[in-house]
Image (tube, rainbow, N blue to C red):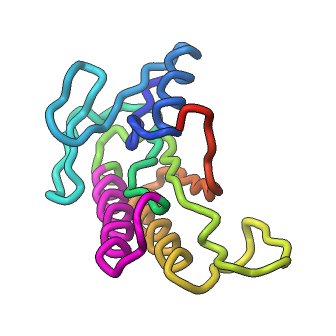
Amino acid sequence: MDVVVTGSHGLIGTALVGALAAAGHRPLRLVRGDTMGADEIAWDAEAGTIDAVRLEGVDAVVHLAGAGIGDQRWTAERKRVVLESRTQGTTLLARTLAELSQKPAVLVSASAVGYYGDRGDEVLTEESSAGDGFLADACRAWEDATEPAADAGIRVARVRSGVVLAQDG
């Protein structure tokens, strides 16, 4: 399978690209800036540009890109960056995938457990409603940005992960 990965140089993305390659798949990295090889595809979410031709016929897309939420203070400016890094990139990617003549079967898009907000001891499931606060609002907007892909018939899976820890990250 040809699998496009955004955020491929991050903690999860790096591990995923390695695992995909080890399993015999062909990971393609969607990267900002100059591409360094045939396995890289250029995009710039802020500028609204993406090499759509290179996305034609891929089997799946895993979207992990977004500014970190734990590496800086949450100033108003940082919150803007966090929100826009997720919604702009996701919107660009979902719209581009929707317009392809050979669409991928699935878009797996990262989200976060912050979607649920702080609910104390309440037991939550995937069917639980969104919570309140910045993270819940950001996650809701992030997930909503995948709709163009879903509307075009692409299966969309939203992965609401928690904090990811690793020995090397």
Q: Which residue is at 46% across, 62% downward?
A: 69
Q: Which residue is at 20% across, 23% downward?
A: 36
User: Is residue 169 left or right of 46 when viewed as pictured?
Assistant: right
Say if 120 sits above or below 6 in the image. Answer: below
Q: For this rendering, which residue is in front, 99 or 11? A: 11
User: Is residue 68 left or right of 111 when viewed as pictured?
Assistant: left
* Magenta-drawn segment: 71-96
Number of on-image labels: 0
Q: For this rendering, which residue is in front, 127 or 131? A: 131
Q: For this rendering, which residue is in front, 53 or 138? A: 138
User: Can you name the residue that lies furthest to the bottom here?
Assistant: 132
- Residue 128: image location, x then y, percent: 74, 75
Quadrant hosting residue 104:
top left
Quadrant hosting residue 136:
bottom right
User: Can you name the residue that lies furthest to the front here?
Assistant: 73
- Residue 102: image location, x then y, percent: 34, 38
- Residue 45: image location, x then y, percent: 24, 55
Q: Is residue 88 magenta?
A: yes
- Give the main secondary structure of the magenta stretch: helix
Q: Which residue is at 39% across, 50% downward?
A: 65
- Residue 74: image location, x then y, percent: 42, 74
Say if 159 sits above or below 3 in the image. Answer: below
Quadrant hosting residue 165:
top right
Q: Is residue 81 magenta?
A: yes
Q: Which residue is at 62% across, 58% downward?
A: 160
